[in-house]
Amino acid sequence: MTVYVDPPAWPGHGRMWSHLVSDVSYDELHLFAAGLGMPRRVFERDHYDLPSHRYADAVAAGAVQVSSREVVRLLRASGLRRRKRAAQRRSS
């Protein structure tokens, strides 16, 4: 099982966030996230948003540290990338 995490560089809700992804399957990602105690409701299309204070926990649990660009590359190469629909992008 390999799950990847990018650095906490994404601001939102008064904190910084990382993305937690799998390049194998969503099931693998859900299993890893559950092991961290993350509720399934925080899964967003193709990743989990991970608050910066949980970054070290993810790495300690085995997540491989990669750049944000690498997260996108891994998702695209695996076929697991799910882009926002146009209506969602306009309202964001």
Image (cartoon, grey):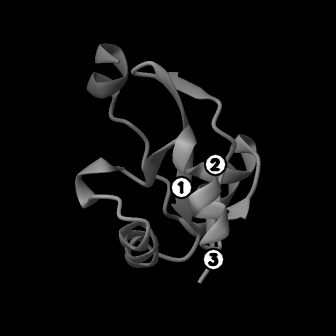
Residue 77 vs residue 69, the one in the foreground? 69
Q: Which mark is residue 2?
A: 3
**Residue 67 versus residue 26 in the image, above or below:** above
Which mark, residue 41? none
User: Circle 1 sits on which residue?
Assistant: 20
- Would residue 54 be found to the left or right of residue 6 on screen? left
For the residue labelled by badge 3, is the local secondary structure a helix, a strand or a loop? loop
Badge 2 local density, few (<14 within 10 Å), some, or many (20+)? Answer: some
- Badge count: 3
| Lower position in the chain sequence, tag 2 or tag 1 | 1
Q: Quadrant of residue 57?
A: bottom right
Kind of residue at disc 1: Leu
Residue visible at 26% across and 60% down in the picture? 40
Residue type at mark 3: give it.
Thr
Please tell me whether mark 1 sits on a helix, a strand or a loop. strand
Other residues around mark 3 within 10 Å, as few (<14) / some (14–19) / many (≥20): some
Quarter of the image where the C terminus is located: top left
Residue at (38% x, 77% y) in the render: 27
Instruction: Please name the residue that numbered disc 2 is placed on.
Output: 72
Residue at 50%, 54% in the rendered image:
81
What is the crowding at mark 1: few (fewer than 14 residues within 10 Å), some, or many (at least 20)? many
In the image, residue 3 sits, relative to residue 51, either above or below, namely below
